[in-house]
Image (cartoon, rainbow, N blue to C red):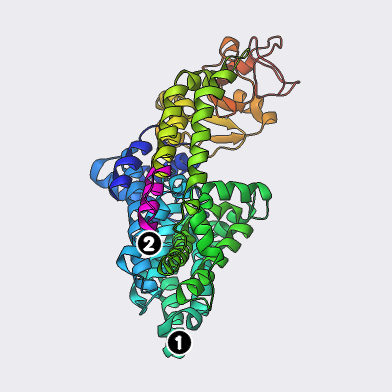
C-alpha cells in the first residue's frame, strides 16, 4: 500500500491524460457536467449507449467538491487501485481459508505486474469494473454475503453494462463445485443467486429506463446491446493471436520468470482444492470474454487476475510446507539476468545506436542518460541475486524491484513519448476559437480527445475528406482538425497548428485557407487532388 501510494500518484502526474481512452472519459464527463445531464452519458453532443454512467458519476462527485479539473480523476484511479489490492487480499483470506501471512502475498504478486499499471494509468472504467468484479467474488466466497453481492453486481452493471454478468455467471452456476456453503444447501444457493441477480438487474434497469426516457427511442433501443456490440466488434489482437499471447506474457512479468513459481505449479499433485476450483470457475470465463470481446481485454484480465494469483499463492504455500524450492537454482536469477541485460543495453547498446547517422531524437535523449539508467537496472539485478531463500522474502523483494522498474520505464515513456500525445496545446487553440464563436470540424473520426481541455460547448463536426470544401464554404470562419502522416511543413502552408501526435501529425487549418486557389506542394492536407488548397499546401494524402 505504501509503495502504491508513493509511486502511482507520481506516475499519474508525469504527463497529461492520454488519448484516446482517458481523454474520451474526461470529454464525456465534461459534456454531462456542462449540460447538467447526469443520467445519459453524452459523447460529442449525442447520447452514447456504449458508455455506462458510474465512472462519470464518480468523476462528477469530485468535481462537485473541487470544481472541474483533471487532478481528481487521476487520484480516483489511484484510489480504485488501492481498493482493488485491498479487496484482493481480503478475498485471499476469506475465500480459501488462507493464513494472513500467505494472503499478504497476493497484493505483492499483483503490484509487481504491468497489467494493473496499464489499468491505473488510464482514466477508464477498466479498473472500476475490476474492483466491482473482485467485490462480487469476495461476497460469493466463504459464507456468501448476498446483499454485498447485489451491491457489487449492480455497481458493475452501471460501470460496464451487461458484460458484468459474464464475470459472475459461471461462479454462480458452479457454486456447489467450489463453495462449501453451496455444497451444504445447493437449493438455497441457487434460490438466493437468482434473487440477487434479479435485484441487481432491477437496479440497473431502473437507471436504464430513466436514461432511455431522456435519451430518446433510438438511444433506448441501443442501450442494452451497444456496450456488448462495441467491445465484441472492436478491432485488435485477441488471445488467439500469438502476438497478443506474447504481450500478455510480458505483462505478467516478473512472475513468468520466477523458477520457484513454475516448480510450485508443475509439482502440484492431488485433487484440486477449493481455491483452485474457484480459480477455474472465475478465470476461464474471464479469458473467454477477452477472446470474444477485444474491447474488454484489459478489464477482463485485470478483473480475474487476483483469483489467479490466489491459486498461485496456494501452490507456493503448499510447496513451502513440503520444504521444496529452497535451492538457489529456483531463485529469481532469470529476472536478474533480464534486468542486467536491460542495464547493459541502456549503457552500451543505446549510445551505440544513437551514434549512427540520423538517429531519432528520442534515441539521442535516451543515450544521454543511458549510463545512469543502466546502473539503476544493474543494481536491481544485483539485489535480486542477493535475496534470501524464503518464499515470502523473495516475493516481496521481487515485487518491489519490479514495481520500481515499471515506475522507471513509465518515467522514460513520460519523458520521451508522452509529449507527442499531449492534446492540451491544440485544445487551447480550439478553446479560443470556440469562445470567439468559430465552429470546429475534424476530418475523420473524432474520439472526444479535445473536448475536455478545450471546454467545448458545441459538438465537433465529423467530416470526410471529400466534404472538406463543402464544410469550409458553409463555415468560412471555422477550424478543421486533421490527423495526417505528413505535417512537418503545414505551418508554412497556412496551418494554425501542426505538431507530432503519436505516429502522425495533428494539424489545425483555418477553413478560409481552403477557399483560396493555390498550387500544390508537399504539405499535409486533408483534401483530395481535385480540391482547392491553401497556399503551399499539398492536394493529396
Q: Position of residue 290 (x, y in %)?
A: 58, 58
Q: Which residue is mark 1?
A: 183
**Secondary structure beneath label 2:** helix
Q: Position of residue 122 (x, y in %)?
A: 44, 43
Left or right of 228? Residue 190 is left
Task: Measure the alpha-carbon separation of dots 1 and 2.
Answer: 24 Å
Q: Residues within 10 Å of mark 1 (few under 14, many from 20)?
A: some
Q: Which residue is mark 2?
A: 88
Please, is residue 457 above or below residue 517 in the view? below
Q: Position of residue 239 (x, y in %)?
A: 63, 55
Left or right of 424? Residue 443 is right
Q: Residue at x 59, y 15 (%)?
A: 490
Q: Position of residue 167 (x, y in %)?
A: 50, 66
Residue 523 visible from this viewpoint: yes
Q: In front here: 230 or 177?
A: 177
Please, is residue 200 above or below residue 437 in the view? below
Q: Residues in magenta? A: 385-401
Quarter that holds the C terminus:
top right
Q: In front here: 142 or 492?
A: 142
Q: Residue at x 48, y 80 (%)?
A: 175
Q: Earlier in the sequence, mark 1 or mark 2?
A: 2
Magenta-colored segment: predominant secondary structure: helix
Q: Residue furthest front?
A: 327
Q: Tags 1 and 2 in contact by the CB under 8 Å rule?
A: no
Q: Residues within 10 Å of mark 2 (few under 14, many from 20)?
A: many
Left or right of 467? Residue 384 is left
Amino acid at each position: 500500500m505504501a509503495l502504491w501510494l508513493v509511486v502511482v500518484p507520481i506516475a499519474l502526474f508525469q504527463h497529461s491524460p492520454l488519448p484516446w481512452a482517458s481523454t474520451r472519459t474526461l470529454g464525456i464527463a465534461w459534456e454531462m457536467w456542462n449540460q447538467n445531464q447526469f443520467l445519459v452519458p453524452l459523447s460529442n453532443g449525442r447520447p452514447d449507449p456504449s458508455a455506462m454512467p458510474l465512472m462519470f458519476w464518480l468523476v462528477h462527485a469530485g468535481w462537485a467538491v473541487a470544481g472541474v479539473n483533471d487532478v481528481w480523476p487521476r487520484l480516483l484511479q489511484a484510489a480504485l487501485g488501492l481498493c482493488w489490492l485491498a479487496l484482493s487480499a481480503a478475498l485471499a483470506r476469506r475465500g480459501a481459508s488462507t493464513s494472513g501471512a500467505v494472503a499478504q502475498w497476493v497484493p505483492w504478486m499483483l503490484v509487481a505486474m504491468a497489467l494493473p499499471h496499464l489499468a491505473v494509468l488510464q482514466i477508464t472504467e477498466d479498473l472500476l469494473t475490476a474492483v466491482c468484479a473482485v467485490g462480487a467474488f469476495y461476497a460469493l466466497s466463504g459464507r456468501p454475503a448476498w446483499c454485498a453481492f447485489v451491491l457489487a453486481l449492480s455497481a458493475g452493471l452501471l460501470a460496464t453494462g451487461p458484460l458484468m454478468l459474464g464475470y459472475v455467471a459461471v461462479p454462480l452456476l458452479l457454486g456447489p463445485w467450489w463453495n462449501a456453503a453451496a455444497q451444504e444447501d445447493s437449493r438455497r444457493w441457487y434460490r438466493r443467486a437468482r434473487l440477487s441477480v434479479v435485484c441487481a438487474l432491477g437496479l440497473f434497469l431502473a437507471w436504464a429506463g430513466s436514461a432511455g426516457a431522456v435519451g430518446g427511442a433510438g438511444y433506448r433501443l441501443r442501450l442494452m446491446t451497444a456496450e456488448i456490440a462495441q467491445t465484441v466488434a472492436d478491432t485488435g489482437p485477441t488471445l488467439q493471436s500469438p502476438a497478443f499471447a506474447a504481450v500478455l506474457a510480458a505483462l505478467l512479468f516478473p512472475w513468468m520468470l520466477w523458477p520457484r513459481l513454475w516448480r510450485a505449479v508443475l509439482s502440484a499433485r492431488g485433487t484440486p482444492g477449493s481455491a483452485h476450483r474457484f480459480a477455474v470457475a472465475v478465470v476461464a470465463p474471464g479469458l473467454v470474454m477477452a477472446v470474444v470481446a477485444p474491447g474488454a481485454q484489459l478489464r477482463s484480465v485485470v478483473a480475474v487476475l487476483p483469483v489467479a494469483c490466489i491459486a498461485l499463492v496456494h501452490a507456493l504455500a503448499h510447496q513451502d510446507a513440503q520444504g521444496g524450492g529452497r535451492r538457489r537454482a529456483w531463485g529469481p536469477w532469470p529476472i536478474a539476468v533480464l534486468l542486467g541485460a536491460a542495464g547493459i543495453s541502456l549503457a552500451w547498446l543505446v549510445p551505440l545506436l544513437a551514434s549512427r547517422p540520423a538517429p531519432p531524437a528520442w534515441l539521442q535523449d535516451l543515450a544521454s542518460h543511458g549510463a545512469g539508467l543502466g546502473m539503476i537496472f544493474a543494481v536491481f539485478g544485483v539485489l535480486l541475486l542477493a535475496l534470501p531463500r524464503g518464499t515470502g522474502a523473495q516475493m516481496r523483494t521481487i515485487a518491489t524491484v519490479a514495481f520500481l522498474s515499471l515506475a522507471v520505464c513509465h518515467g522514460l515513456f513520460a519523458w520521451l513519448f508522452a509529449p507527442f500525445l499531449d492534446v492540451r496545446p491544440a485544445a487551447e487553440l480550439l478553446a479560443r476559437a470556440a469562445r470567439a464563436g468559430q465552429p470546429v470540424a475534424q476530418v475523420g473520426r473524432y474520439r472526444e480527445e479535445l473536448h475536455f481541455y478545450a471546454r467545448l460547448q458545441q459538438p465537433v463536426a465529423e467530416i470526410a475528406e471529400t466534404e472538406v470544401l463543402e464544410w469550409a464554404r458553409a463555415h468560412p470562419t471555422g477550424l478543421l482538425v486533421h490527423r495526417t502522416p505528413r505535417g512537418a511543413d503545414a505551418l508554412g502552408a497556412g496551418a494554425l497548428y501542426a505538431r507530432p501526435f503519436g505516429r502522425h501529425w495533428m494539424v489545425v487549418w483555418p477553413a478560409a485557407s481552403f477557399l483560396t486557389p493555390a498550387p500544390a506542394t508537399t504539405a499535409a492536407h486533408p483534401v483530395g487532388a481535385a480540391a482547392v488548397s491553401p497556399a503551399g499546401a499539398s492536394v493529396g494524402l
